[in-house]
Image: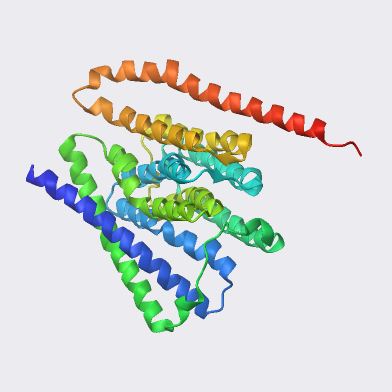
């Protein structure tokens, strides 16, 4: 038991170091960007976004360097599932999230396309370094496109990006460099401590590293996104809360996973059959679920937020149940999910789509003819 307690303590300390390191990294990077005269819009779309995904990146690369590929891949998959179901769900419970049409037209379809592409890349059992480079190129193209779109349609971006304070650069470059350096050091140490603790905990509990990565590690590395979105929702900045989630999911796939694949260029990032057949499809389905939810009502209601949180709990139970003394109930649990839960979710989405379609038709009929 002391060994398990030690592993649990490592996980908690690692998450704390990652959170603190990520905050300092963002602050230092933002200050440097302001010193060099980079526009605030570009900082919000790049520096801040990259900073919030830094914990996932460091954990995945550290996992690869410690020969824990399953932990690296499952961290990305689990983080994306956590972002959509828990971060969006929790934020919607705080305040119903109004969805901008730009997200429905552009960002969510892109997230769905990249999720499907990653599943295809991993289907052979390995994400090669070539696939990692392709994802990074896609990230660069998307970032340039994002910046150009934001400049051409500034009104569409209002409230959708974090506000950057000019005071962040008042101390000059030495404090900024110190923050950046300490942030990187904390991220490096925290990632190694977290990976070590997670691997030990997995061995002690008799579960795979993938299960730990899909649950504990992914939840821990997604804390910056959760806190950012909750604070944004409390302030009424719902565009930022949703954009933070979608942007983080894209970065996890196009930067974090790509970084892990390139770090293991010799053999590629190995992906277990369990992740390919079960968890990657769930990740894609959660991305697909965003489109009808966003499209049908133009917002995420508290009821939909509660539904997302409930589905995440069921997902975690489905992963953990087979590894407990209640494993004999696994088949019954999955049968219940298949026969009742999934049909109920589909009926809810289809019903909302029909209601939205009828309302839209009624509004068009009520409009005066030209």
Q: How many marks?
A: 0
Q: Is residue 27 left or right of residue 155?
A: left
Query: Visible in this render: residue 124?
Result: no
Identify the image quadrant of the N terminus: top left
What colour scheme has been applied to the protein in the rendered image? rainbow
Tell me where residue 52 appears, x and y as whole percent: 42, 58
Which residue is at the far right?
A: 370
| Residue beneath the point at 46% across and 22% down | 342
Q: Is residue 27 left or right of residue 103?
A: left
Identify the image quadrant of the C terminus: top right
Q: Is residue 52 left or right of residue 195?
A: right
Tell me where residue 295 appears, x and y as whole percent: 62, 37
Query: Visible in this render: residue 298?
Result: yes
The foreground one among 55 and 12 is: 12
The foreground one among 124 and 356 is: 356
Q: Is residue 71 left or right of residue 309?
A: left
Q: Is residue 357 above or below residue 271?
A: above
Tell me where residue 277 appears, x and y as whole percent: 42, 29
Which residue is at the far left?
A: 2
The foreground one among 235 and 293 is: 235
Q: Is residue 251 above or below residue 177?
A: above
Tell me where residue 153 appears, x and y as whole percent: 70, 59
| Residue beneath the point at 40% across and 77% down | 176
Question: Residue 322, located in which quarter of the rendered image?
Answer: top left
């Amino acid at each position: 038991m002391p060994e398990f307690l030690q592993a649990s303590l490592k996980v908690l300390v690692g998450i704390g170091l990652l959170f603190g390191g990520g905050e300092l990294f963002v602050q230092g990077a933002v200050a440097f960007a302001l010193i060099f005269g980079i526009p605030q819009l570009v900082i919000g779309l790049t520096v801040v976004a990259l900073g919030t995904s830094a914990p996932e990146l460091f954990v995945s690369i550290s996992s690869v360097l410690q020969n824990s590929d399953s932990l690296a891949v499952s961290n990305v998959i689990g983080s994306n599932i956590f972002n959509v179901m828990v971060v969006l769900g929790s934020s919607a419970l705080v305040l119903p999230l109004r969805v901008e049409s730009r997200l429905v037209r552009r960002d969510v379809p892109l997230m769905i396309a990249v999720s499907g592409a990653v599943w295809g890349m991993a289907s052979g059992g390995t994400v090669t370094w070539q696939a990692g480079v392709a994802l990074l190129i896609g990230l660069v193209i998307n970032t340039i496109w994002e910046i150009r779109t934001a400049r051409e349609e500034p009104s569409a971006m209002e409230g959708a990006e974090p506000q950057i304070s000019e005071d962040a650069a008042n101390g000059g470059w030495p404090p900024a460099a110190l923050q950046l350096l300490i942030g990187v050091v904390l991220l490096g140490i925290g990632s190694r401590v977290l990976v070590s603790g997670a691997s030990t905990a997995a061995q002690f509990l008799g579960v795979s590293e993938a299960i730990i990565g899909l649950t504990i590690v992914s939840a821990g590395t997604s804390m910056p996104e959760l806190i950012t979105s909750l604070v944004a929702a409390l302030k009424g900045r719902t565009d930022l809360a949703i954009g933070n989630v979608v942007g983080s999911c894209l970065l996890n796939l196009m930067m974090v996973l790509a970084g892990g694949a390139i770090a293991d260029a010799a053999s590629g990032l190995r992906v277990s059959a369990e992740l390919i057949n079960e968890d990657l499809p769930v990740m894609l389905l959660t991305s697909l679920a965003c489109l009808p939810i966003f499209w049908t009502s133009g917002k995420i209601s508290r009821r939909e937020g509660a539904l997302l949180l409930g589905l995440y709990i069921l997902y975690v139970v489905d992963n953990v149940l087979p590894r407990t003394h209640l494993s004999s109930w696994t088949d019954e649990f999955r049968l219940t999910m298949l026969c009742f839960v999934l049909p109920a979710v589909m009926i809810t989405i289809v019903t909302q789509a029909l209601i939205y379609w009828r309302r839209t038709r009624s509004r068009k009929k009520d409009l005066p003819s030209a």
